[in-house]
Image (tube, rainbow, N blue to C red):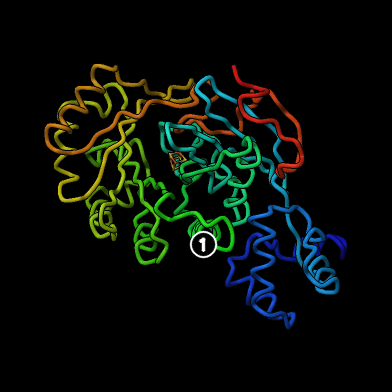
Amino acid sequence: MTAVSMAAVQVPDLRDFTLSELTEWIGGFGEPPYRARQIFRWLWKRQIHSISEMTDLPRAFREALVARARLSPLSVVGVQSSRDGTGKLLLRLSDGEEIEAVLIPEARRLTACISSQAGCAMGCRFCLTATMGLHRNLRPAEIAGQVLALASTLAPGEHITHIVLMGMGEPLANYAATEKALQILTAKTGLGFSPRRITVSTVGLVPGIRRLARSDLGVNLAVSLTATTDEVRNDLIPINDRYPLSELLRACREFPLPPRRRMTFEYVLMAGVNDHVEDAHRLVKLLKGIRCKVNLIPLNEAPEIPFHRSSRQRTEAFQKILERAGTIGTIRESRGQDISAACGMLATADRSLDTARSVPYTPECGVEQFGSSLGS
Ligand code: SF4
């Protein structure tokens, strides 16, 4: 490796810093805290893609930053738009890894579904991402940066209202970077998202749930439960072997929930696997005492997945049993299925993105709007 490329590897990416880390880091240059807020605004509000664009910094300091820091781009290499308005971006990271991020419009919401890892090691048998295996963890800049990338595709006046970490990867298996990304996304100086509008979804990593509970992040928790016995769950979600249902639900019971908020349990319904009447009754019992709602998600079928979705009739019967017992159960309509953007369908091995090109994610680079170039 040459001296130049060594330096490039070693200098920090400014978007990896939380505001307090940035304040401390620039303190090493003798710069006051307000400079960190200036830089943070450039990075996250004005969404620049080169340090030299920070025109209100003194020239000498800017030059010092250019020499000692970097901004690594997330390049949009593919954009796809579903018939239902869901949009999917294929993003290339600075080392060539690729991830996906999805934008889901609903009645009064525009939700960004972002990834926390390139691939995933969890091996859930109903999920396409699992077939990739884990390539690597994402850095905070790469997790939070997906929100900028998605926002850059919006029409003027449109705004992302909610963020869910339900894309590729298990966020709590990449805890430190996820926590920093959440601090960055919620920082008032930057994008200023309310934690109430952010949901971290886990497949059940108990130590991560406990860590999140101890943090002061205040984000929502969603748990992909998807089975009501350890026997079935061990088969569908291998990590259940390590953190069985009793332990997982204890951690959920102990998770601090602010007033009027509910935890979400995701339940992917698979025909003949976990959609029996007995499952619905067991689910009610398992969740007793937890302020929660259940999202019933019909499986998104794919040739690589050895299961089929439950029929509409069985899905509705399952929901009715929950309702009668006073448990909120919502059937989630599958979004973006025609572009493989639906839950459990993200995997960059899918090379069918029909708009392949490489552009930085900043709005001025002319990424076309979802719906205008690709909508059908
Ligand atoms: S469901 Fe989530 S945790 Fe499981 S393999 Fe897919 S991405 Fe990973």
Residue 205, position in %: x, y? 37, 53
Say which amino acid is labelled 1: Gln
Question: Left or right: 113 with respect to 375?
Answer: left
Res 137 visible: no
Most foreground residue, 261 or 358: 261
Assess disc 1: are there few (<14), some (14-19) or many (≥20) residues with their C-alpha within 10 Å of its C-alpha.
many
Label 1 near ligand 1 (CB < 8 Å): no
The residue drawn where x is 38% and y is 45% is 203
Residue 306, position in %: x, y? 41, 24
Residue 227, position in %: x, y? 27, 37
Residue extending farthest to the bottom is: 30
The residue drawn where x is 61% and y is 24% is 371
Q: In what quadrant does ligand 1 lie?
A: top left
Most foreground residue, 50 or 58: 58
Disc 1 element: helix
The residue drawn where x is 48% and y is 39% is 111
Q: Label 1, on which residue? A: 183
